Amino acid sequence: MAYVFDVFTEPRRGNVLTGSVRYRGPDNPDSHGFSQGPLFGLQLIMSGWEELCDFGFPRPGAVSAATEAEFKELFELDSGPWVRVDEEGYLLKEGSTQVRIPRVKAEEPYQGQLHAERGRRFSNGAHYIQLAPQPDEFARRATEIIVSWNIHEDDSTALEDGEGASADFALEVSDPRYLEHFAQGEYFQTVFTGLAPS
């Protein structure tokens, strides 16, 4: 996975988060300017929560259980949820390694919902298929969570060798719980670009 941005944030101030994003390298093929919509703000908040985990596990108390559950749901809306199956593609019982009875291939109940590009994966001894993202619902949720989003490219300094363009941002959320994990200044990397899920 190639990270697109380095992200630097200041400690949150109530409902407000400020910081900067920098393209990783001047020749980044994804470099197309900076997204102006609230999707990018929400994606940065989500990515910050994910990237600031310790060995894949959220920092204890970093966010409330309700916020953690909502972030997981938002990731599924943005990139598509994974459904657990056996090696032949049959759905498993919830929280089990046993196939559902009657046996049903995932393609049947999820017809038309399978991710067109990603398909299947095998991780930690389990098989998964990925469902399609829900860009309209993700965009709706972004406008509920991100009250304001401002980003502007920093053109005041010349780029040094090996650096990509950078921008400063400020966002405001509808509820301060979405920024619980930014109690201090943070640095993380993200693959999010502000584009709607496809």
Image (spheres, rainbow, N blue to C red):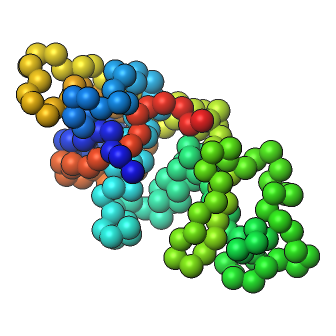
Q: Nearer the viewer, residue 161 or 57?
A: 161
Q: Is residue 141 above or below residue 80?
A: above
Q: Nearer the viewer, residue 142 or 51?
A: 51
For the image, the number of numbered tags is 0
Q: Nearer the viewer, residue 51 or 129?
A: 129
Residue 31 locus on image (x, y percent): 33, 26
**Residue at the extreme right:** 102
Question: Could you tell whether 169 is left or right of 43 in the image?
Answer: left
Give the residue at x 38% y 69%.
Answer: 57
Give the residue at x 64% y 70%.
Answer: 127
**Residue at the extreme top:** 155
Give the residue at x 26% y 29%.
Answer: 27
Residue 123 locus on image (x, y percent): 53, 71
Q: Nearer the viewer, residue 134 or 103?
A: 103
Residue 6 locus on image (x, y percent): 25, 41
Residue 166 locus on image (x, y percent): 21, 27
Give the residue at x 81% y 57%.
Answer: 107
Asked where in the image residue 56 lies, by quadrant, the reply is bottom left
Is residue 67 visible in the rendered image? The answer is yes
Q: Is residue 119 above or below residue 136?
A: below
Quick one: quadrant of the C terminus? top right
Question: Could you tell whether 107 is left or right of 85 in the image?
Answer: right
Question: Could you tell whether 83 is left or right of 121 in the image?
Answer: right
Is residue 70 visible in the rendered image? The answer is no
